[in-house]
Amino acid sequence: MSAATAATAGTEVRRPGRWRGIGTLTRAELALTVRRGESVLLTLVIPVTLLVFLSQVPLLPTADRSVNRLLPGLAALSVLSTAMVGLGIATAFERQQGVLKLLGVTPLTRGGWLAAKLGAVLTVEALQLAILTIVAALLGWRPGGRVWLTLPAVLAGTAAFAGIGLVLAGRLRAETTLAAANGLYVLLLLGGGLIAPLDVLPGAVAAVAELLPAAPLTELLVWALGSGGAPGAGHVVVLAVWAVAAPLAAARLFRWQPG
């Protein structure tokens, strides 16, 4: 057997093991998510509860209570809660407790660890969106012809918010990450266009919100899932920049060991 053939054979032997390792870790991440009551509350219970409550109780202006407006915002909230809050907090505690350090002595590479994390995040998001759309359909929502745009919007939003969550987790103590992630969650929930449109916010607040990833993600999802018009080019550019810049910042700033 030639050296090239041997190298190829070795690659073929190692590759299934690597993918099995990623799959195993992805399943473990999903199991841990289910066992964490606060994660289930944050990612599954709160968005569905808000969808039902806000569509039935007149706390918002009448025009904003339609399921067509609430569903896209709560879909964006689901991405925010899973990709930034859930991923960031869990990773921060794993880092502080030395779990990430142990990866250095396992066959699973850092890239494999990240793939497993993102696989778990995307699986939870898919479950969230499925539940939200089923409940929304029961409340009167009907899909239009642009539902397929939900996928690229969610992927871009996931990249942006996961990058932010990993920056927090990789630079701050776990307790600080917990506070910072939850603080950002509340701020973006109230002022990021997720529940009420930006035009009901003060001008300065709305201007800042449009530069953050939550508002453009919501606008894209309103176009895909709701009855709104096409988002402006600025929204697409802002979300695309966050989707690229946040993961790059996480790759550069993330520290695998606490210190």
Image (cartoon, rainbow, N blue to C red):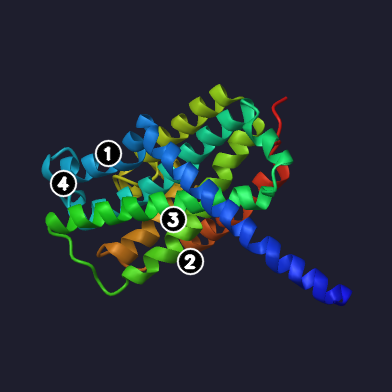
| Secondary element type, mark 1 | helix
**What amino acid does circle 2 point to?**
Ala
Query: Mark 1 to mark 2: distance in Å?
Result: 33 Å
Of marks 2 and 4, the one in the foreground: 4
Task: Please rate how many residues cluster around mark 3, counting C-alpha atoms within 10 Å: few if below 14, some from 14 to 19, many from 20.
Answer: many
**What amino acid does circle 3 point to?**
Pro
State the residue position of label 2. 233
Query: Mark 2 to mark 4: distance in Å?
Result: 30 Å
| Secondary element type, mark 3 | helix
* Residue beneath the point at 45% across and 54% down: 122
The residue nearer to you, when weighing 48 against 34, is 34
State the residue position of label 1. 45
State the residue position of label 3. 216
Place of residue 82 in the rendered image (x, y in percent of width and height, measured from the top left): 43, 44
Of marks 2 and 3, the one in the foreground: 3
**What amino acid does circle 1 point to?**
Val
Residue at the farthest front position: 1
* Residue beneath the point at 27% across and 39% down: 45
| Secondary element type, mark 2 | helix
In the picture, measured across the screen, residue 122 lies left or right of residue 52, that is right
Q: Which mark is residue 81?
A: none
Query: Mark 3 to mark 1: distance in Å?
Result: 24 Å
Task: State whether residue 248 appears in this view.
Answer: no
Query: Mark 2 to mark 3: distance in Å?
Result: 10 Å
Sequence order check, earlier mark of 1 and 2? 1
Above or below 218: residue 99: above
